[in-house]
Amino acid sequence: MSNDNNNTKDLRENNIEMIRNRKPRMAICYDFDKTLSPNDMQTFTLIPSFEIDAESFWAESDKLAEENLMETNLAWMYQLLNYSKFKRKSIRKEYFREIGKDVSLYKGVEEWFDRMDKYAEKQGIILEHYIISSGLREIIEGSRIADKFKRIYASSYYYTPDGVAEWPAQAVNYTNKTQFIFRIAKGIFEEYDDSVNDSMPDSKLYIPYENIVYIGDSATDIPCMRLVKSKGGYSIGVYDPEKNMRKKVYQLFNDGRINYYAPADYTSRSELTQYVKQIIDTVAAKEKMKTDQMILNIDASLYNSIRSMEQMYERTKEQATKKMKKDMESTLSEMKDFLPGNID
């Protein structure tokens, strides 16, 4: 066997080893309010901190949106800035993050991420967590679980150089939430990067769509739930364990928006934990199949190359010189020797 053939054999073995050692990724994307936290951060945390009546605030905000054909999230963010000026109380990023420390969380949430990461790791999966929320990013960044997320996609303000909120920079609503699913899948994370709209083959995705889980609680999550489920991923609807109001999840399930529904209980023995573990197991099994198929494809692709070269040789050999024929026949012979099994 020639040195070239030895090198080809080494390359084949190295490729197989690389494929066997690959670490597939998986993502869990979460809404925040009523999904990880039992409360709405604006209504129960932010607005009361300004000593504003929540009911009056939302009525005024909705009226502002309606009269000016304004997106509702932009309206409340703008309205809050007006209140801060009226009360001569500047809104600073640090202020929001301080509020975030007091945001309540459902039972088991703080331990959930590390527990799921360890379980996924045992199955050979790298698990990443993402927030996709209409709430305020700066408050979520101040929460006790902020460091568990690879990215936090949420509404946010533009700040002056001295850190005072001046204008809404990002308003996330139920329709534009879906863009972040595409960003996560493609690994194009920055909100300003328009290349997320470029076509990308499945083989190049940062995280395959079928390896994405979306967890949410309400109708505002439907576009993301539908997108993830339609692309082979998994959507889960959650509801408050104490209130036990299941109307939304029943409807979402009946409408085919979600794969599962469960109480928002993130403890180790909860239904939600069992469902997510099942999903991780399924993803791991599918990725094992992909690994085996990728390895099989090495020899199958070589066989295809041999057949293509033979067809080309048959079409051109009458015009080829003796040296060209000899070189081609030698190359084909070496390729066949390298390929396991008899193909003649």
Image (tube, rainbow, N blue to C red):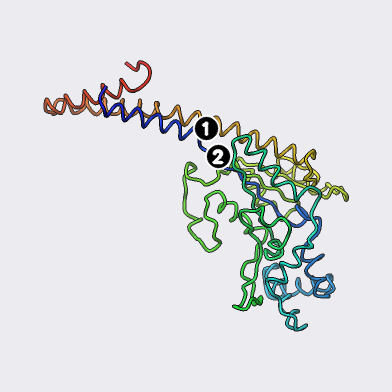
The reply to whether callout 1 and callout 2 are in contact (CB within 8 Å) is yes
122 in relation to 257, above or below: above
Quadrant location, the C terminus: top left
209 in relation to 73, above or below: above
Which of these two is toward me, 126 or 286? 126
Which of these two is toward me, 95 or 331? 95
Task: Return the x and y of residue 173 as percentages of the image width and height.
Answer: 67, 61
Task: Return the x and y of residue 185 as percentages of the image width and height.
Answer: 55, 48
Name the mark on residue 290. 1
Looking at the image, is mark 1 or mark 2 earlier in the sequence?
A: 2
Label count reads 2
Instruction: Give the quarter of the image for residue 10.
Output: top left
Name the mark on residue 168. none
Which of these two is toward me, 306 or 122? 122
Horizontally, residue 325 falls left or right of residue 86, namely left
Q: Residue at x 41, y 32 (%)?
A: 14
Q: Secondary structure at mark 2?
A: loop
Residue under label 2, please give it.
24
Task: Return the x and y of residue 77 as percentages of the image width and height.
Answer: 70, 72
Crowding at mark 1 (Cα within 10 Å: few <14, some 14-19, many 20+): some
For marks 1 and 2, give the CA distance.
10 Å
Q: Secondary structure at mark 1?
A: helix
Q: Nearer the viewer, mark 1 or mark 2?
A: 2
